[in-house]
Amino acid sequence: MELPEELPQLYKRHIFACATQRPPMHPRGSCGASGAQPLWEKLGKKIEESGLSAEVGFTLAGCMGFCSAGPLMVIYPEGVWYRPQKEEDIDAIFESHLKNDQLAEELVVVLSR
């Protein structure tokens, strides 16, 4: 079966945020050990309180493969990766990307394998 040219979309955007928590001093590190949890809690609350939950999906994910770069999140369909470090970064991503359809350029991370 071929993929249809256009599928109905459930969300305008879908965010995946790494919530992996490895033990302290693990050689790969983890987003959880880098302080991801309070950032994702803030983002989830902002999405709910703003009324955007009908058009923005938010999913906590397992390891996304770039452990030492965390905390990491990716927003689809654009495929933009962000590396927020503090709650103010979540505010910037929310306002720029989710509300105003603009990149939060200073927080974009370009990853390579």
Image (tube, helix red, strand yellow):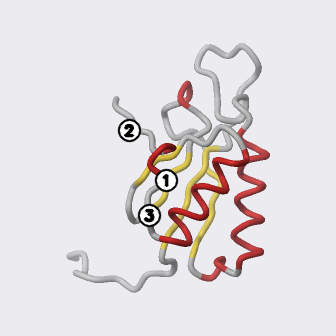
Horizontal side, residue 27 vs residue 48: left or right: left
Depicted 104 relative to depicted 11: above or below? above
Horizontal side, residue 1 vs residue 94: left or right: left
Q: Quadrant of the N terminus?
A: bottom left
Q: Which disc is residue 104 wearing?
A: 1
Query: Where on the picture, by quarter, is residue 51?
Result: bottom right
Tag 1 near tag 3, CB within 8 Å? yes
Q: Residue at x 59, y 64 (%)?
A: 95
Q: Mark 2 vs mark 1: give the one in front.
A: 1
Tag 3 near tag 2, CB within 8 Å? no
Q: Which residue is mark 2?
A: 110
Label 3 vs label 2: CA separation?
17 Å
Q: Amino acid at mark 2?
A: Val
Which tag, 2 or 1, sits closer to the chain's start? 1
Depicted 22 relative to depicted 54: above or below? above
| x and y percentages locating residue 68 in the rendered image | 55, 24
Relative depth, front residue between 66 and 63: 66
| x and y percentages locating residue 24 in the rendered image | 76, 18
Tag 3 secondary structure:
loop
Q: Which residue is mark 3?
A: 102
